[in-house]
Image (cartoon, rainbow, N blue to C red):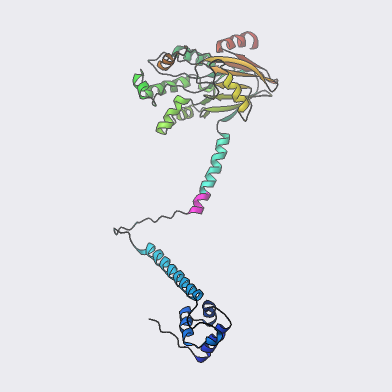
Amino acid sequence: MRSQKLWSRDEEQKLSDLLESGLTASQISERMGRSIGSIQNKRRTLDVSSLGEPSGPTGEDVAEFENSALETEILNLKAQVEELEKTEPSMSGVEPLLADDWNGPSEWTRAEERSSRDIGRAESLGKFRVKFDDGPVAICAMSDQHIAPGTPCDLKRMREDAELIRDTPGFYAMLGGDGVDNHMKHRSAMLAAGSRIDDQWKLFDHYLTIFAEKILVVISGNHDAWTPQNAGVDVLARIAESHRLCYAPAEARIAVTVGRQNYDICLRHQYRYNSSFNLNHAVKRLFEMSDQPFDIGVICHHHEANLEAFLKHGKLRYGARPGSYQMTSGYSRQYGFNNAYPTCPTFILFPDERRIIGFHDIRDALWAWNAHIK
């Protein structure tokens, strides 16, 4: 135990003077360089009754002394705990070889930088541009092939349409999703299918080889999205990459330049505000609510074909629903939907002036193309 330093007469006199001046024990401790306890003990031995002070410590002095002692004890305990955390092993005696070096500020900075990159990527995702030096050009919207042998899917018409686009100069295609059935999400539909999912994807891959050089862009549909959603693998993205095709999930915005004329096309697989009584209602709502207007809007998914020209902001625009090569299905029969037909709505875009002619069916567009345009 550390011995206490004896008080000299000068120190006792100084203590008496400080007490007489009304200073507290804590203040006197700071001035004299002695502990509060030592000040309190010496105070009791001094005759300070003439100063009107009680012979013992005041309540304020006692509380101050106890608080100071408690704070000191807490600091000592914290230091001991920190030291034990650094040196003591776990209760079982197992010591980790790798300490947790997670650093909040640096991790936040890294996450902030990544989020900035993700925002920039999201703003550019699904946006494409293509330029044709002369024209006109014809762009066909094709969707909902639902390739699945063993189902009423018109594979013959699908092949013929692809070959027609491939063999006609100036004709190009956009693919709007659901190229295969891919019923991996629904066990009952997968069990009832007449083909394996792997075979469906292989046939779709072959289908793209027919006219890959004429495909401007490919987007995914809800059937395509079931694979990345359930397995974490985007098969459609990999197939598109193998054919060097531009790909985007769910939606594509295509800036098309023909000669000196610019056209904006929006291709989506699904959208809100659908109506069974007005098939292009969703396309018009997309135009009004989107942050980017378009000259041609195409929404797929519902398997019912439709084409409509409409005026918005003083310009003639087109909305289309491409239909489907899957004529019917157990789902459509169960819920009373009509049979579907693929029409591949086609739009002829002219150079040097804003002029669009839309055709409900690709074959009508080909007739006009051969008879009046080329």
> Where does residue 239 sit, x and y in percent of width and height?
45, 27
Q: Residue at x 57, y 84 (%)?
A: 20
Give the residues in magenta.
102-109
345 in magenta: no
> Where does residue 115 sit, x and y in percent of width and height?
53, 43
Q: Residue at x 53, y 82 (%)?
A: 53
Q: Residue at x 34, y 21 (%)?
A: 191
> Where does residue 184 sit, x and y in percent of width and height?
38, 26
**Is residue 55 among the parts visible in the rendering?**
yes
Instruction: Please identify the quadrant where the C terminus is shown.
Output: top right
Instruction: Give the side of residue 213 with respect to residue 93, left or right.
Output: right
Q: Residue at x 43, y 55 (%)?
A: 101
**Vertical placement of residue 170 versus 18, above or below:** above
Instruction: Give the side of residue 286 with respect to residue 5, left or right.
Output: right
Mainly helix, strand or loop, the magenta region?
helix
User: For residue 2, which quarter of the picture?
Assistant: bottom left
> Where does residue 251 sit, x and y in percent of width and height?
54, 27
